[in-house]
Image: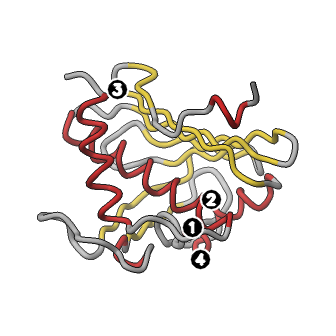
């Protein structure tokens, strides 16, 4: 059986407060690296913001989830049209590894591994201590990666907020209290 047939789209808790999710995406690895580091490409699936590729470089991530898909779906109560996060690059090894700080959590690590014509993207988000944050973050990473996969493959992604709301309910059931 190939990796493409066994890879589950859902992320998992790999430690009590660490969420890990993977996607097998069309390569080459340099293209996926650009979607992580180029603010214009990153804003198409996650968040805008220019990034200098060096350890210690500041990074402001700007989410406008309503702009990721057309239609965007129904934004849940309590979510703003825009969200900003001050971050910095904590580790970088182009085009294989990028780590950034992430608010009051332990940060996010992106790892890229070539697998033939495809690239395995692994996202690890550490030290998410509150259950409500864990559920929002889990659904968020899942939906953002679904959008990245759709855009790279030339497909139309599910409306962001509708997909996120459904995924949050699914992660609520999947991740034990």
Q: Secondary structure at mark 4?
A: helix
Q: What residue occupies the far left of the structure in this picture? A: 77
- Does 46 sit left or right of 92 as displayed? left
Q: At which x and y percent is residue 49?
A: 51, 72
Q: Is residue 127 above or below residue 31?
A: above
Find disc 4 in the rendering and name its residue. 40
Q: Quadrant of the N terminus?
A: top right
Marks 3 and 1, the one that precedes in the sequence? 3
Q: Earlier in the sequence, mark 1 or mark 2?
A: 2
Which numbered disc flags the more N-terminal residue, 4 or 3?
3
Find out whether the residues at labels 4 and 1 contact each other: C-beta distance under 8 Å. Answer: yes
Question: Decide: marks 4, 3 in contact (CB < 8 A)?
Answer: no
SS state under label 3: loop
In this picture, residue 3 sits left or right of residue 174 = right
Quickly name the residue at label 2: 36
Total number of numbered discs in the rendering: 4
Q: CA distance from mark 1 to mark 2?
A: 6 Å
Residue at left offset 37%, top offset 70%:
65
Residues under numbered marks 1 and 2 in contact, where contact means CB atoms less than 8 Å apart: yes
Q: Which mark is residue 42?
A: 1
């Amino acid at each position: 059986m190939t990796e493409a047939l066994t890879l589950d789209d859902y992320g998992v808790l790999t430690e009590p407060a660490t969420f890990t999710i993977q996607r097998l995406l069309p390569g080459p690895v340099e293209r996926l690296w650009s979607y992580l580091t180029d603010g214009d490409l990153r804003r198409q699936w996650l968040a805008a913001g220019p990034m200098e590729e060096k350890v210690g470089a500041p990074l402001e991530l700007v989410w406008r989830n309503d702009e990721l898909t057309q239609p965007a779906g129904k934004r849940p109560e309590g979510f703003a049209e825009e969200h900003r996060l001050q971050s910095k690059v904590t580790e970088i090894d182009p085009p294989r590894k990028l780590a950034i700080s992430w608010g009051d959590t332990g940060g996010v690590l992106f790892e890229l591994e070539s697998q033939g014509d495809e690239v395995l993207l692994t996202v690890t988000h550490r030290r998410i201590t509150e259950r409500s944050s864990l559920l929002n973050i889990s659904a968020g990473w899942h939906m953002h990666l679904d959008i990245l996969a759709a855009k790279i493959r030339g497909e139309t992604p599910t409306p962001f907020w509708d997909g996120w709301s459904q995924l949050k309910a699914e992660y609520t059931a999947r991740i034990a209290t």
